Amino acid sequence: MSLIQVSEGLLLRRRFLQLSGISSIGFLLGGCGSSLFDGVVGKMTEPLNQSVETLLLNPQKPVPEFPLSAIQPDALLINTFDFTPEIDREKFRLIVDGEVNHPLSLSMAEIQQMPLTSMIIRHVCVEGWAAIVQWGGVRLRDIVSLAQPKANVRYIYFKSADGYYESWDIASALHPQTLMAYQKNGQTLSTRNGAPIRLASPIKLGYKQSKWVTKITLTNNLLPSKGYWEDQGYEWFAGI
C-alpha cells in the first residue's frame, strides 16, 4: 500500500482511501513544520479517520526497510517549530510519567545502555519531500515497558525542549520500529536533527516525529491539546 501524492505533491492521500474508495474530502494531511495547510482539515471527519486507520495498522507488522546503499545523507530537510534548543547532554534527563507504576528519569548514558536498534526507513513529509535515513536508538516500547504502564493506557504524549508537543495512539508507540533515536546515519544525532533524542518511525508522517524530546506521558484520555499542528486543524493519526 503506497501513498498517492496530490495537489502538486503537497498533500498525501491515505492508504485506506485507495482501498475503500472513501471520498478524500476532509482526509487531507498537513504539517511537518509547514504553515501551508492552515485550516484545511475538518475536525468532523477525525473519528472515522482514526478508526479506519487503526484497523489498517498492524501494531506488530514491520515496515520493509532499505539497504545501506539507499541512504540519502543530504535529503533530510531541517524543519524547526520555534527555535533550536541547546541541551546539555550530561545533564539531560528523559522523564516518563503519567499512568505508570514506575516513573522514570533516564540519563542519556542509561538510555544508551539499553539494546540498540538500527533501521533504514523513509521519512515522509507532507510538504512534498521524503528522505531515506538510518536511525539508531532504543525502541520506545522498551522504555514504556520499564515504566510499567497501567492497563488503561491508550495514548502517549511527547513534550520537547523547544515547546513542541505531540500525542500518539499507544499501538503506534509500541510498534517495533518506533524508536527514541540518538543516531542518524551511524553518527551521533546532531542538535539540528533533534539531539539528544527524538522520535523516529516509518509508520507516521514527519510532523508526528518530535525532536528534542524531554518528557513522555502515558494517559488513558486524549487531551484537548493533541499536538501543535493538530490543534491548528491538522489530522491527528497521521499514519503512513
Image: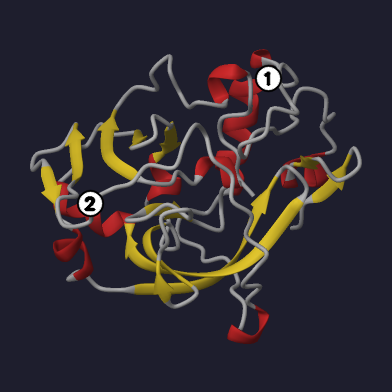
Give the x, y percent position of residue 153. 28, 34
> How far apart are the two marked residues, 1 and 2, measured between alpha carbons?
42 Å
Instruction: Examine the image and state in which quarter residue 6 appears.
Output: top right
Judge left or right: residue 145 versus residue 33: left
Image x and y of residue 26, in percent: 76, 22
Q: Position of residue 139 (x, y in %)?
A: 33, 61
Q: Amino acid at mark 1?
A: Thr
165 over 186 or under it: above or below? above
Element on which disc 2 rests: loop
The residue lying at 30 percent from left, 74 percent from top is 116
Question: Residue farthest to the right?
Answer: 8
Q: Residue at x 45, y 43 (%)?
A: 210
Q: Tell me the crowding category of disc 1: few under 14, some 14 to 19, or many 20 or more residues within 10 angstroms, Cα based.
A: few
- Residue 164 is drawn in which quadrant? top left
Kindly indicate the quadrant of the structure image that contains residue 219.
top left
Whether residue 201 sits left or right of residue 37 in the image: it is left
Indicate left or right for 158 with 33 as reference. left
Which of discs 1 and 2 lies nearer the camera? The answer is 2
Residue 88 marker: 2
N-term mark: 1 or 2: 1
Rendered view: 33 above or below 146: above
Q: Please tell me how crowded label 2 is: few (under 14), some (14-19), or many (20+) other residues with Cα within 10 Å.
A: few
Name the kind of residue labelled 2 in the image. Asp
Q: Is residue 80 above or below residue 134?
A: above
In this view, the residue in front, 152 or 181, is: 181
Q: Which residue is mark 1?
A: 45
Residue drawn at 71 percent across, 20 percent down: 38
